[in-house]
């Protein structure tokens, strides 16, 4: 909800302020996914991974996708021709096309770059009460992920997803012990 409000997006379900879409879309830059195997359950925030070497940037022939300050991957409407190669280039399936708009855009998380430019932080980070979602440099985030792993090795899988996966990402994940990253929808990219 905070993401939608900070980015001027309409709810997927116009009758509900608290709707929870099942997938990323032209109205959802991030989603909270629920995982359960019957014994364990967890939640996962799915959004743009802001890759170290983004496939969407490489696939974009006109430079509408750019890797910016703070490693944020942004989209510039004035350079986009709507080819949607970015969708094919992203191994995470993040860029979404507004199929129902007369002048469609590509929609994806840009880490609230407009808020960061004004000295703020992403809306999702600001409202997260348990610090499951945090913001910082990639080095700071990796250090925090490894600190959490070292402090409670029995709690987490012994891997930081995104440290090396797909060449590295700036959005990193820890998974509860016994939950595989593939089960959460994160591809095994080597």
Image: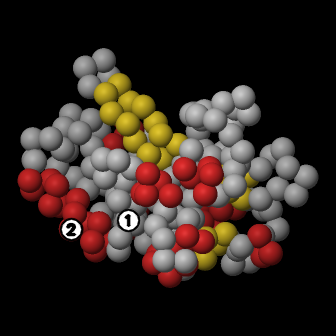
Residue 59 at what x, y percent from top left?
64, 69
**Residue 17 vertical placement versus 80 (above, below):** above
Residue extending furthest toward the top: 38
Q: Which residue is mark 2?
A: 143
Residue neighbourhood size for the residue with mark 2, other residues' Cα within 10 Å, grouped as few (<14), some (14–19), many (≥20): few
Q: Quadrant of the N terminus?
A: top right
**Within the image, what quadrant is residue 18 found in?**
top right
Which is more foreground, mark 1 or mark 2?
1
Circle 1 — which element? loop
Q: Which residue is mark 1?
A: 135
**Residue in view at x 55 percent, y 78 percent:** 117
**Residue 31 vertical placement versus 138 (above, below):** above
**Residue 135 vertical placement versus 183 (above, below):** below
**Residue in view at x 74 percent, y 77 percent:** 62
Circle 2 — which element? helix
**Would residue 65 appear left or right of 52 to someone viewing this image?**
right
Residue 68 at what x, y percent from top left?
54, 79
Q: Nearer the viewer, residue 169 or 100?
A: 100
In the image, which disc is placed on residue 8?
A: none
Total tally of numbered discs in the picture? 2
**Residue in view at x 21 percent, y 68 percent:** 143
**Would residue 71 appear left or right of 133 to someone viewing this image?**
right
**Would residue 43 appear left or right of 100 to someone viewing this image?**
left
N-term-proximal mark, 1 vs 2: 1
**Within the image, what quadrant is residue 133 found in?**
bottom left
């Amino acid at each position: 909800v905070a993401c939608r409000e900070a980015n001027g997006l309409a709810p997927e379900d116009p009758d509900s302020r608290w709707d929870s879409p099942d997938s990323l879309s032209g109205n959802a830059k991030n989603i909270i996914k629920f995982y359960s195997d019957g014994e364990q359950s967890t939640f996962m925030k799915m959004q743009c991974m802001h890759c170290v070497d983004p496939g969407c940037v490489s696939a974009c022939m006109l430079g509408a996708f750019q890797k910016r300050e703070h490693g944020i991957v942004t989209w510039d409407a004035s350079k986009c021709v709507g080819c949607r190669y970015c969708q094919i280039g992203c191994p995470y399936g993040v860029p979404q096309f507004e199929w129902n708009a007369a002048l469609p855009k590509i929609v994806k998380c840009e880490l609230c770059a407009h808020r960061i430019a004004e000295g703020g932080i992403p809306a999702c980070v600001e409202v997260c009460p348990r610090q499951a979602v945090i913001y910082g440099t990639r080095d700071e985030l990796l250090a925090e992920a490894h600190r959490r792993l070292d402090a409670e090795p029995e709690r987490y899988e012994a891997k930081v997803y995104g440290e090396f996966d797909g060449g590295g990402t700036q959005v990193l994940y820890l998974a509860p012990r016994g939950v595989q990253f593939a089960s959460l929808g994160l591809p095994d990219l080597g």
